[in-house]
Image (cartoon, coloured by chain):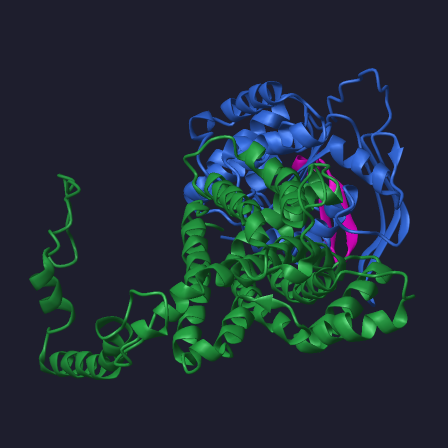
Amino acid sequence: MSQATATSHGDTPMIEMTGLNKWYGDFHVLRDIDLTVKRGERIVVCGPSGSGKSTLIRCINHLETHQQGEIVVNGVPMTQDVKRIEQIRRNVGMVFQHFNLFPHLSVLENCCLSQTWVQKKPRADAEKTAMEYLERVQIADQAYKYPGQLSGGQQQRVAIARALCMRPEVMLFDEPTSALDPEMIKEVLDVMVELAREGMTMLCVTHEMGFAKTVADRVIFMDQGQIIEEAPPETFFNNPRSERTKLFLSQILGH
Amino acid sequence: MAGESMRDVMIEARRPPNAHRGVVKWLQRNLFNGPINSVVSVITIGVLLWALWPFVQWALIQADWLGDSRQACSGEGACWVFISARFESIIYGFYPEAARWRVDIVFALMAGLLAWLAIPRIPGKRWAAIIAVIGFPIAAYVLLLGGHFGLMHVSTRNWGGLMLTLTVATIGIVGSLPIGIILALGRRSNMPLVRAVSVVFIEFWRGVPLITVLFMASVMLPLFVPTEVEFDKLLRALVGIMLFWSAYMAEVIRGGLQAIPSGQDEAGKALGLGYWHRMGLIVLPQALKLVIPGIVNTFIALFKDTSLVLIIGLFDLLAIIRAGLTDSDWLGFATEGYVFAALVFWVFCFSMSRYSQYIEKRLQTGHTN
């Protein structure tokens, strides 16, 4: 199923969630989630809006706090301890729907910020790494511009490079193409496909079913805060078992 | 043909049509481009002339500028001799004449540092900041107060005039900004105790008139502390002013913090940055830039309100001019005195305002999201 690269970490899963529950006030957003992501696995999470898919991946780097259950990231159990949370976050890269680049810093500075302050790298090393990744997302020529001077697609590629600069072991994508104009979606997806080919562990919340078909090892369908169906893409798209999944697929693939 | 078209030669970008240049063209386009606009322009100019001309005549044309005593005043217009005769005391207050060179040095240091910090072309901003934050206060303290290195001690009771106004304003401005930042962050903290303390502090100081604060500091405080402990009156006023304005500053900055999308903080978290890094490197730089107008507005209000220290017996610029009005040689020159005081305050406040607008433009980084 997956070509998990067995490294020195052995077979410890990248992410392990057991019995995860979360409420916003009285609203039960995540219900009894059990999910294991192996090293090198690419997972696409889809589902109708409000189904809890963003909330789910935001729990992994503790942008959201869960009330019940356990999350273990790269062998490190999540607790409320700030140091522990920051340790986990250093291994987890995240790309947001609205890019969230720092508008007061240049593209290069965006990529160097956490290298300098979290990893304490010397300026020159940080810039070298930043330029390497900007090169890989093909935007190195814009390094000295400010985010506000770039198109949405360019900004999202910078955001991916910024996350990669921390050399994370897993990348979370929270609807990375939903805020983009149609003609820019491809440039971002190309970068993501490339990243998947290199064996990065990825968890993507997206509506891009083409992307799911191409790179996903598993597709997860969520509705009302629960995982409804989990299957490799061929099975998921051709022989969905659940009625909800069929309805969802007919709605997004129907035209 | 209808509904179908095709272009095979693309249109080259052209320059915009030339704008009309020259004073006459400008006047025509902006003030006299039509009968109604022309009438409005003429009336406005007329009203302005009618309202301002007597003042111009009094203050400039018929005014007396030269001389050193009351005899130089003709009585037709303003007599600025009143100001020039008392110029030294307006600047230095009751600071002993023999030691006024020390005040001059502090003024010069301050002007130099301000220029170094404020003019972008001059390099070494980091050093300028270090000197301004550490070196300058020590130098100013030693020079102004004396008592060390063979310098004569000058009690703060003798401080006055512009020198006192600038001291109070500078310390108030430099002190209230960082305290305000801490309070604003505290008010948004997740820790209930920190938040509660910040809210109570801000609401207390914001709810009390500055005059009350100054009275409390100068009259009430000595009643509560043992008589052996003697706080300097100026110091007490300074602490009061600083805390009072830091509460206002906190609310201005909180407004800026709230305007920064939560995604910025989340992106910082996702990169593994800790709280102080996220605040110091991501959120505050953007928030402070956003509220520069509000911050400078507070600075200006603070600068002008330093004149309230006169009610606790400190002789700032305004108080020293008022004191001059009671001089039996110079009775009846109140207008000149107040106009001059207003002019000095205005020059400082207007400079701050212009500089803040310049900084806002400079910090513009293209279209923000």
Taking depth in this image into account, of A212 and A103 the one nearest to the observer is A103
B9 to B69, vertically: above or below:
above
B258 to B31, vertically: above or below:
above
Taking depth in this image into account, of A191 and A231 the one nearest to the observer is A191
* Span highlighted in magenta in the image: A217-236
User: In the rendered view, does A235 fall on the left or right side of B255?
Assistant: right
Residue B24 position by quadrant? bottom left
Taking depth in this image into account, of B121 and B108 the one nearest to the observer is B108
Q: Position of residue A21 (x, y in %)?
A: 86, 54
Q: What colour is chain A? A: blue
Residue found 61% across the figure and 18% down from its top: A125
Q: Is residue A10 magenta?
A: no
Q: What colour is chain B? A: green
A114 to B313, vertically: above or below:
above
Magenta region, main secondary structure: strand
Q: Is residue A221 magenta?
A: yes
